[in-house]
Image: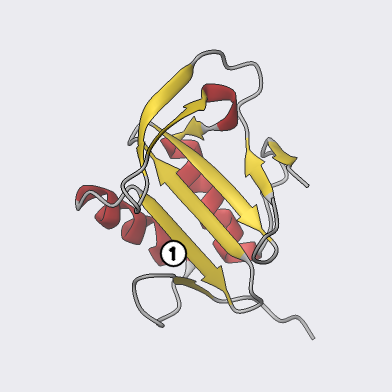
Amino acid sequence: MLVIESWVINDDSLVPTSSEMVLEALRSRIDSGQLETWLISSSGRSLAFATNTERAMVMLLDEEGDPGEHAVDPGCEGSSDGFVLSNGQHDEYPDQDTVPIREAFRLVEHIVGTGSWPADASWVADR
């Protein structure tokens, strides 16, 4: 029997967010100035999305305290700032450790829908 995880936005509500609705929710949060979003799955995994509106850090963690895995943009040089976290912290990340926001949306939508990275995604394990 195949059991599919359900995901909720951690600080939103207990209503599951489907892959069809997650991008609308992320865009709405970005429009309201919330550049960091955490989704929690029914199996206890976490999916983090932090953006500066041009690039995004996408991380998938198996459990609390897990270093997890994150999307990468191999060969990309430079760094980007403007990643404002919910605690007010302003971060700058190497561009190779973030992806263009359109790609980040695709990754989040796929993970929420299937539970895993798309086959053609570039990501690294931080474990």
Report x, y in % for residue 67. 69, 51
Report x, y in % for residue 105. 46, 46
| On screen, residue 53 above or below 78 | below
Report x, y in % for residue 54. 36, 31
69 sits left or right of 37 in the view: right
Neighbour class for label 1 at 10 Å: few (<14), some, many (≥20)? few
Q: Residue at x 59, y 24 (%)?
A: 96
Q: Residue furthest left?
A: 32
30 sits left or right of 21 in the view: left
Q: Residue furthest bottom?
A: 1
Q: Residue at x 38, y 26 (%)?
A: 81
Res. 92 image quadrant: top left
Res. 5 image quadrant: bottom right
| On screen, residue 44 above or below 103 | below
As rendered, which of 71 and 19 lies closer to the eye?
Answer: 71
Indicate the quadrant containing the N terminus: top left, top right, bottom left or bottom right.
bottom right
Question: Helix or strand or loop: what does disc 1 sit on?
Answer: helix
Mark 1 = which residue? 20
What colour-coding does the image apply? secondary structure
Report x, y in % for residue 24. 32, 58
17 sits left or right of 99 in the view: left
Which amino acid type is marked by label 1? Glu
